[in-house]
Amino acid sequence: PEATRFGYIVEGRSMDLDYAPGTVLDCISIFANGTTPQPGDHVIVRRTKPDGLRELTVKEFDERGGDYYLLPRSSQP
């Protein structure tokens, strides 16, 4: 109940097998309740590049041998 809830609109096709462009994603912050992503979960990742440009992406989370991966689910190569 105390989790921060927010939404994003999907742009692009990197996850179009699950979310068509224009889909509204209903999200909650995992930081509020200490949730840890599990393989197969879809996660929103935000990063800031050294030049200050910010990027947001939704990808499928995976873990293999202690390494973490963000996997696209696209109909396009």
Image: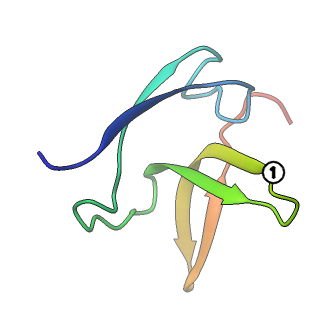
Please give left or right for residue 6 compared with residue 75 in the image: left
**Which corner quadrant holds the N terminus?**
top left
Please give left or right for residue 26 compared with residue 76 in the image: left
Residue 18 on image: x %, y %: 54, 28
Please give left or right for residue 28 compared with residue 40 in the image: left
Please give left or right for residue 73 compared with residue 30 in the image: right
Q: Is residue 40 above or below residue 58?
A: below
Q: Is residue 51 above or below residue 23?
A: below
| Outermost residue toward the top in this view | 22
Q: Which residue is mark 1?
A: 53
- Taking the spot 72% from the left edge, 35% from the top edge, the residue there is 14
Q: For the residue labelled by badge 1, is the local secondary structure a helix, a strand or a loop?
A: loop
- Taking the spot 65% from the left edge, 39% from the top edge, the residue there is 73
Residue 56 on image: x %, y %: 65, 45
- Taking the spot 53% from the left edge, 72% from the top edge, the residue there is 63
**Which corner quadrant holds the C terminus?**
top right
Q: Nearer the viewer, residue 53 or 69?
A: 53
